[in-house]
Image (cartoon, rainbow, N blue to C red):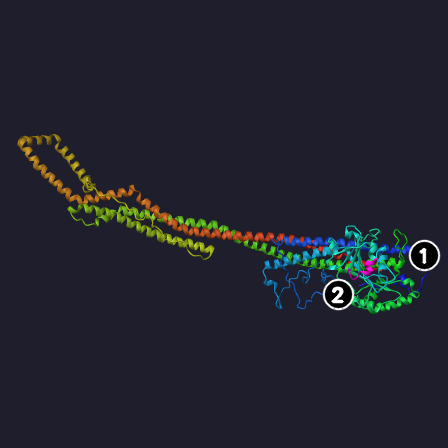
Amino acid sequence: MFSPPVLSPSTSSTVAPSPSVSTKAARTQQHRLNAAQEQRMYHDSCQRLLNHISSVTRVCEGLRENSSNFPIRYPMMHRPNDRPLPQRAQTLMTPYANDYHLETASQPDELNILNLDLKMGHSSTDLTSLESKSITNLLDDRLAQCVRHLENLRTRVADTSSKVLVTGDLNAGKSTFVNALLKREILPADQQPCTSMFCEVLDAMLNDGVEAIHAIPDASKYNRLDASTYHIVEERHMFKVVADEGDKYRMLKIYTKDARTTQESLLHNGVVDIALIDSPGLNTDSVKTTAVFARQEEIDVVVFVVSAENHFTLSGKEFLWNAANEKTHIFIVVNRFDSIRDKERCKRLILDQIRQLSPATYADADDLVHFVSAGDVDLMPGSTKCDAPEFARLEQRLRAFVLENRTKSKLSPAKNYLVNLLSDLNGLAMSNRMIAKEEHLQLTAELEQDLPAYQQLLRVRDRLLHQVEKVAEVTVLGIQKHTLQALNMAVDNIQTTVEAIEYPGVFLIWQYAQDIADSMSQSLVKHVRQAENHAKTETNECIERVHDMGEEHLGNYPRVGTVDKMCLKNRDRRVVISVEPTDLFDLSLDDKMSGAALSFGAIAMVGTRLLGVKDAMSGFWNLSSAVGARNMRQMIIPVMSIAGAGLLVYIVSDMRYAVKRKLVRKFTTAVREQAYIEGQCSRIGREARKALRVEGWEIQNRLVRAIEQKEKKRSETEHKAHHAEETVVYFEKVLENSVALLDKVQSIQIESNSRGAMSSA
C-alpha cells in the first residue's frame, strides 16, 4: 500500500550535527513544495475525473435517449457458475466503492456494472427467454442507476472537505498541536486537561466568511442557518466553555480564518479543505465514544497525539485497538519530543508499541509516525520564523495522508467505477455493433435474393393480366357470335314453329292468330334460353381456364368466379306483336299469286296481240248488240254475284294461310325493328364478361396484394437494413467515444501520485 520506510533525519540512528538555520529553512521550504506538488497532482486528478464523469454521464444519457431508435441488445456472454461476488473494500472505502474488477477496452467475458444476471428463486433467468423490449427496459433502468451513481461520484469527488480527528491521551498536547497546524492560537491550551468536548475547527468561508464559535447542545440537530440549534460563544469565554461546560454542550464548531496564503492554508486551499476536530482526552469513559466517532464515514484521517514522556497509556492502546478495525493506518504524532533526553530510546520504545498496536502503521512509520514538539511552533501573527523541518515534514505528510485517504475513499472508487462502466459500455457497443453488422449483411442478402422473385412477379402481373383479358374477350366474342347465328336462324325458321299449330276453323280464327303470335314469341325465347345455357357453359369453361392460369402463378386459391347468377336480369324480354283484324286477310299477292298474275298478264298480252284489241272490242260490241242492252244488264248481276261469292269463298279458304303469312312477316319485322337479336347478343355477352371479370379481378387483386406484400416486405427489409447500418454507425461512435474515455480514465495515475510523492519526500 505504501512505499517502504525511508529513513529521515528524524529517524536516523546516528546523531547528526545541528543543521544551520539556512539548512532548516531549505528543508522546510522543500517540504512545503512537496506538499504543494501533491496538492496539484491531486487537484489535476480530481478535475480530470470530474470531466470524465461528465463525459460518461453524457454517454449513458445518450444511450437512454436513443434507446427508442437504437435499442440495446444484451450480449449473451459466458458466465461461469462460480462467479465470485463483489467484495467491499476493507478500509476507508465508502458504500459507493464496490470492488469492481478492471477491464480493458476489449470485449469482456462478462459485464460488471451492467450485468443483468437475474435471479428467480434459486436459479438464474435465461436472458434469451426474455423479450428484447424487456431487456432494453432492464438495461435502461440499469443505465439510469449508473447516471444517478455518477452524479453521486461527481458530488463526492468535487467535495474538497476532509475531516481530521485529533485524539490522544489526557494532556498529550492535542490542542497545542491543532494550534500549531493552524499557526494561530485558537483552541485553549493548558498544562492541565482543559478540553471536555469535541471542538471542530473549520474555515470561516463555510460561515459566509464570518468568524464565529457555535456551542451545540445536540450535534444531530445542528443547522448553521438555524440559530435555535446552537449558542454563539465569544472568543474570550471559549476557555470556560471548553473546560467547564462539557455537560451542557456536546460539540463546539469554530469558524476561523487562516492568515496564510491559499496554497499554504490547511483549512481552505481549494484542493483539500481540512476540518480539524479536537477531541477530549482519552479516559475510561471516553475511549469507546471517541473510537465510534473515529469510525464515522466522513472522518478521513485519525491523528493520535501521544506524549513522548508517557508513551501509550492503557486508554491509548484500547483506542488504537478499537479504531484499527476501521482505520488500519493511524497518523501518530509523538509530541514534546524535544524534552526527551535519550531520543533514540524513546523512538525505539514507541515504535515497538506501535508495531504491536497497529502493524500497518508501523510498516509505514516513516510517513505516519512523527516525533515533534508542537509547542515550539511560532504562533505570533505575521511571524516569518520557519517551522522546524520535522514539523514541516509532519504537515506535508499529513496533507499527503489526507490526499491518499481521499484518493482511496473518493478518487480510486470513482476511477474503478468509470473503468468498469466504460468496459461494460465497450462490451455493449461492440456486441451491438457486431449484431447490427450481421443484421445488415443478412438483410442485404435477403434483398438481393428476393429481387429476382419480385421482378418476376411484376412480369407475371403484366403478362397474366393480358392473357386473362385476351382469353375472356375471345370467349365473349365467341358467345356473342354463336348467339347471333342461333337467333337469326331461329327467326328465319320461325315458319316451322307456326306450321305445328293446328287450325281450329274459321270461327276460331282470332284465337288461332293469337296462338301463332304467342308461339313465335315463346319459340324465340326458347332459343334465347338455349343461347344463355351455351354462354354459361362456355363462360364456366373459360373461368376454369382463367383460374388454372392464376393458380399456375399464384398457387392454389378458391375459385370465386361463377355462372350461377348469370343471365338473371332482363331475360324475360319478348317480341310481342298484337293481332289486328287486317291480319286475317292477305290482299297482297304472295310469290305464287304474283307469278300467276304475271302469267295471266302475259297470256292476255299475247292473246290481245293475237286476236287484236280491236277485234275483241268489236266482238264484245257485236255480242251486246245481238243480245241487247237490257239482257246484258240482267246478266251482269248474276255474274258479279257469282264472282263475289267465289272471291268470298277464296278469302275464307285462304284465311288460315293469310294469318300465318301476315303474322310471320309482322313478327320478323318486329324482331328486326326492335334489334332484338343484337340486344340479346349484347346482354348475354355482358353477362359472360361480368362473370369472367370476377375471376379476372380476383387474379388481379391477388397479384396486387402479392406485389404489395412483396413491396411492403422489401420496404420493411430495406428500412431494417438502413436502420441496421445507422445502428452500426451509432454504436461505432459510442465505442470510439467509450474507448477514448477508457484510455483517458486509465491514464490517471491515482495510486502512484500519493505513493510517488510520499517516496520523494
102, 668: nearer the viewer: 102
Find residue 133 and report its horizontal and vertical position in percent: 59, 58
Q: Is residue 361 magenta?
A: no
Q: Is residue 248 magenta?
A: yes
Place of residue 183 in the rendered image (x, y in percent of width and height, measured from the top left): 86, 55
Among the 4 quarters of the image, the one containing residue 760 = bottom right
Above or below, 660 against 444 in this view is above
Residue 308 got which mark? none
Mark 2 nearby-residue class (10 Å; few <14, some 14–19, many ≥20): few
* Amino acid type of the residue tagged 1 in the rendering: Ser
What residue appears at the point 19 percent right and 47 percent down from the top-left corner? 512
Element class at badge 2: loop
Q: Which residues are magenta?
A: 239-250
- What's the mark number on residue 90? 2
Q: For mark 1, what is the residue?
A: 20
Q: From what the image shows, is residue 622 above or below residue 271? A: above
Q: Nearer the viewer, residue 18 or 104?
A: 18
Q: Which circle's residue, 1 or 2, is located before the other in the chain?
A: 1
Q: Is residue 153 visible?
A: yes
